[in-house]
Amino acid sequence: MNNTITQLFLKYILNQCSKAEIEQVISLIKDGHNDSEWLAAMELAEQENHFESNLSESHKANIYQGIRKAGQFKPRSNQRWWAYSAAAILLVASVGLWLQRSNNPSTQPQAVVINKAESKPLAQTGKKWVKLPDGTSVQLNANSSIDYPDSFEGLKERKVTLVGEAYFDVKHKEAQPFVISTGKLTVTVLGTAFNIKSSADQSQITVTVTRGKVKVQKEGQTLGLLTQNQQLSWKANAIQPLLKQDHIDPKVAIAWKADDLIMDDVTLEEAANLLAKRYQLKVHFDNPALRQCKFTAAFLERNELTQMLNVIGDITNTKLTVNAQQTLTLSGAGCN
């Protein structure tokens, strides 16, 4: 193992590299023979920041391979060096942000994903975007957790347990309802998008629907059927739930979602849909084969859409553009 390379990778992970060092890192990773140095640098980064990593060895290796792939693309002629390097830098941002924020965990509550089949939590500070086994996407707010099985196959219901706040975009499966248990309430859906917020002691729960229809129940009794732009608020000490049907702006309820954007081993289709929801865009693929191209990246709240599109494009060898009609178009040869 080359200790010099390990130390250089460590500087890269901690965002301490100069322009020349970043170019050297990309060159070394493109070479494809420094896997052990990369994993050693990840371990050192964890030790220097005094926290225990929940990233598996395969996840660390996937980040390495993602940076290697990003380094295979040449920068556009009108891009500065840092714009090109961002394609690789942001691939480790999910690690870098974690390292930075873990130094002050008391001010950064965790979003936790618990997979029963693995019998261990997968945690990341701040908010977390999760893809469930059925394709449903969940965005967890800070200090929230979700518990779900390794697979929904063969089950009558797709049942998960939520503590805290999350935004769900449920994959439609008419024969297999999606059921969320939170405190004393259950929310049943077939395919829709909605937000659930429960207090720390689960004595107050609010459900807001942004698309589709959901049923809210307590101990088998239906409290309400909600459709788009409707909200139900329930309090443990209230005789009847407060059902708001008019003048509900769902953007207020889901304003917390507008924050750092983590894309962990997602397809271009999943990423495009996530950006479309965030920026009110339509999505069009010129080449359908692009839909299944996978990548890993992370973006800060302050990153502009154009920068994100350029980075994703460099990583996946794809051109992403938004026209005046607010349509996000993805074109190109894409992944191999």
Image (cartoon, rainbow, N blue to C red):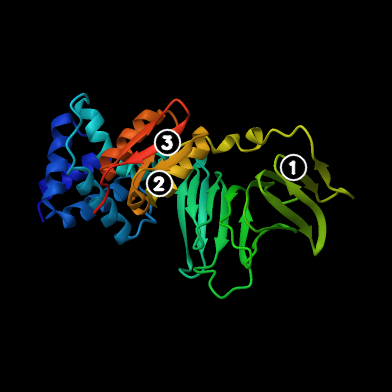
Residue 325 picture location, percent across and down: 47, 28
* Residue placed most toward the observer, 326 or 28: 326
Q: Which residue lies furthest to the right in this view?
A: 239
Residue beneath the point at 65% across and 33% down: 252
Q: How far apart are marks 3 and 1 (CA)?
A: 30 Å
Residue on which the image places disc 1: 231
Does residue 179 sit above or below 124 in this rendering? below
**Residue at position x 25%, y 43% from top?**
317
Q: Are marks 3 and 1 in contact (CB under 8 Å)?
A: no
Foreground residue, 119 or 231?
Answer: 231
Rendering quarter of residue 10? top left
Give SS at disc 3: strand
Please name the amino acid that badge 2 sits on: Met
Could you tell me which quadrant the N terminus lies in? bottom left
Is disc 3 surrounded by few (<14), some (14 to 19) or many (20+) residues within 10 Å?
many
Measure how far apart labels 3 and 2 are at the Cα level: 18 Å
Name which quarter of the figure residue 100 lies in: top left
- What amino acid type should be assigned to the residue bearing mark 1? Gln
Coordinates of residue 238 in the picture (x, y in percent): 87, 48
Of 240 and 104, nearer the camera is 240
Q: Position of residue 309 (x, y in %)?
A: 35, 35
Callout 2 crowding tier (Cα within 10 Å): few <14, some 14–19, many ≥20 = many
Check disc 2 and report the residue beneath it: 263
Query: Three-letter amino acid code at disc 3?
Result: Leu
At numbered mark 1, what does the secondary structure look like: helix, strand or loop? strand
Q: Earlier in the sequence, mark 3 or mark 1?
A: 1
Q: What is the distance, in whole Å, between disc 2 and disc 1 at their CAs?
A: 29 Å
What residue is shown with label 3?
A: 328
Identify the image quadrant of the C terminus. Answer: bottom left
